[in-house]
Image (spheres, coloured by chain):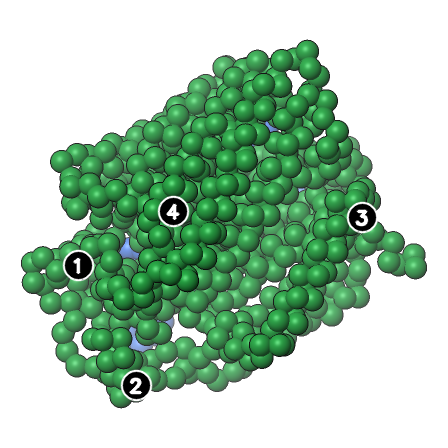
Amino acid sequence: MDYFDRFAVPHPSPAIYVSMVAIGLTVIAIIAGLTYFKKWGYLWREWLTTVDHKRIGIMYLISALLMLFRGGADAIMMRAQLAVPENTLLDAQHYNEIFTTHGIVMIIFMAMPFIMAFMNFVVPLQIGARDVAFPRLNALSFWLFFMGAMLLNISFVVGGSPDAGWTSYFPLAGNEFSESVGTNYYMLALQIAGLGTLMTGINFITTILKMRAPGMTLMKMPMFTWSALVTNAIIVFAFPVLTVALLMGTMDRLFATNFFTTANGGMDMLWANFFWVWGHPEVYILILPAFGIYSEIISTFSRRNLYGYKSMVGSMVIISLLSFLVWTHHFFTMGQGALTNSIFSITTMAIAVPTGVKIFNWLFTLWKGKIVITTPMLYSLLFIPIFTIGGVTGVMLGMSAADYQYHNTMFLVAHFHMVIIPGVVFAMLAALHYYWPKMFGFKLNEKIGKVGAWVISMSTLLAFMPMFFSGLDGQARRMYTYSESTGFGFLNMLSFIGAIGFAIGFCLIVYNIYYSTRYASRDISSDPWDARSLEWATHSPVPEYNFAITPQVNSAEAFWDAKKHGHELFTGEYEKIHMPNNSGVPFIMGCIFFAWGFSFIFGMWIPVIISTIGIFACMALRSFEKDHGRYISVNEIKKTETSRGA
Amino acid sequence: MSELFPRKQVMGFVFSLILTAVALLVYFLDMPFTTGMTVLLITAFIQAALQLVVFMHAGETGDRGSIYTNLYYAIFIALVTVFGTLLTMIWGYI
């Protein structure tokens, strides 16, 4: 039995045992359900082996929503623990584990897949392509991300969760202070998911540079595609740093190297440095696609072209460069001198300039536009003021001398939530409502959607505004409780009420999906929002081959021109279409990676060696496989097109 | 015949061999640490540039613009990361 002791949870509680039972029952229910309804074949053929960018996008979306609820549950527990002074709902260790997994899940496994979902679904449609450049690599990216997410999510029932914060600073994250396998989970799960992200980066840069429809020059690309291009460039340059840092951290923990130790010539703070060399560009990896989404939505519902297209592109390119120049502002108090801090302070303030350009461009797009308030537009309009509060407090934090006052207080927590929630989460929810008809062929209910938008945005203010004040009063972040005499109780209770509001808001979104699936009209046009770019020029839901005829583009708003100025998008006859074949290899490879990561975490070397061989075998199989794809015949295209009413 | 002879490639090959030999001198000759590192750094960068241009055909295709933009961007970020880290962790650290 000694062998199995390593899988025991080091710090158990009734809640964890209940979760174990719940996870077990859910797995049994899923397996039984699939068997009972005879859906195994369907699942394998249509989803697990798919290389279709639209289906992969939908799988990313489902994963993101699931992880949103996982991370949200962590958040509610944290706020509940802090709602009253000296609360004993959670103990210090559980609180540590929960704020750690909340951070990792929300950034890496919620925000990232949410963005990947829309990049996958929308970008090939916006540029008039049939799929991404490397469809099978795309499937592999998804499965690596998914297996990384699953690996992190089993940590709290098998072996213990990571508990050193989502930044996992050494020496706290080293073996000396983090004895359980929790931090190994962090290292390996992020490594596997990160590899997937890196592949996505390469894939989308190639797709956008090489597969645009005829006539679509770079400066005629829709703004979301531009943001995706810039984002993926940042991914390709930033993620290798994370890969290397995680590798060094893993070696420190499992092979007794001394990169980040305090003794033997190690540099513990080098981890913080590397982490943020990746971590700050990561912030822009999250926010730029969100900006792209807002650009699409604001211009669509202002019934105007986007103001300042060139300055939008220019500011994104400048942001992509500046994002690599500011990382030290995450640890101004680490001990580097005034000169270093001043340099990074100035670069930090410089980055507010291109961001400001973008905000003003949206405002000028709204100016004299015929604004239509739909749910996506409502999210976009609510984003601007709330994001600005978060952004302005960011400039306060960016002043290195003043930062000594704010560092590691709730002020910082309030700041980054006020930036990320309106910046990324609102954008993704807006995109969810906006692209839902294109994905599934019916609209989400507008009324429930708008109530949800108001509840979520007001909850953002209620949950995070009090933290600015409690932070300035001296409440430190990551403390699991506080005494009554500090006077933080009232402000934290307000935050807790805000967190409950969030829960209600997200339940409304789920209810909306349920309600609209049952009752919404399926009889909608393929362009329900009267939109401007190419993804709305094909049917909803989109046929497998995207466009029966490759579109001809001659402006940045090709579809709008086609509708209003009589530009012909589709000229010519149907021709047979070359499509990639489905493949089970990416999924199998993902499963092997899961086994590899799991055995690595527990230092079980024989399974590690076997699964490493398995990974290389999969790659060898792909190298020698002769798979030239397949053709969709003209007859089949005609049949699909008539059935969709072309 | 002369236009069929891959002059550029042969020259490149010889030059890369010379660079390798120079780098190896650091091991065989007894020189101070800083001199050795300088020699290694310089030869490494010339070697990388040579390989990219001569043997990996950067700049010979229609997308030379994208390739060079990508390269300059990468060099910029590498330099910023390396020197920024040195500034933060060593030079500017008190």
- Report x, y in % for residue A23: 69, 57
Q: Nearer the viewer, residue A187 or A25?
A: A25
Check whether the beta carbons of the residues at disc 1 and disc 3 lie within 8 A of each other. Answer: no
* Relative vertical location of residue A545 with respect to residue A114 in this rendering, above or below: below
In the displayed structure image, the side of residue A490 where residue A461 appears, left or right: left
Checking the image for residue A9, the label placed there is 3
Q: Amino acid at mark 4?
A: Ile
Camera-near label (3 vs 4) is 4
Residue A63 image point, x, y percent: 53, 57
Subunit under mark 4: A
Q: Which residue is mark 2?
A: A636
Identify the chain drawn in green. A
Chain B rendering hue = blue
Query: Do pointers 3 and 4 mark residues of a single chain?
Result: yes
For residue A159, side relative to residue A519 (left or right): right
Picture disc at residue A558 = 1
Q: Earlier in the sequence, mark 1 or mark 2?
A: 1
Total number of numbered discs in the rendering: 4
- x and y, in percent, of residue A243 in the image: 58, 50
Q: Residue placed farthest to the left in the image? A: A565
Q: Which residue is mark 4?
A: A448
Residues under labels 1 and 2: Cα distance?
A: 27 Å
Q: Earlier in the sequence, mark 1 or mark 3?
A: 3
Select label 1 or label 3 by which is in front.
Answer: 3
Precedes in sequence: disc 1 or disc 4: 4
Q: CA distance from mark 2 to mark 4?
A: 39 Å
- The local secondary structure at tag 4 comes to helix
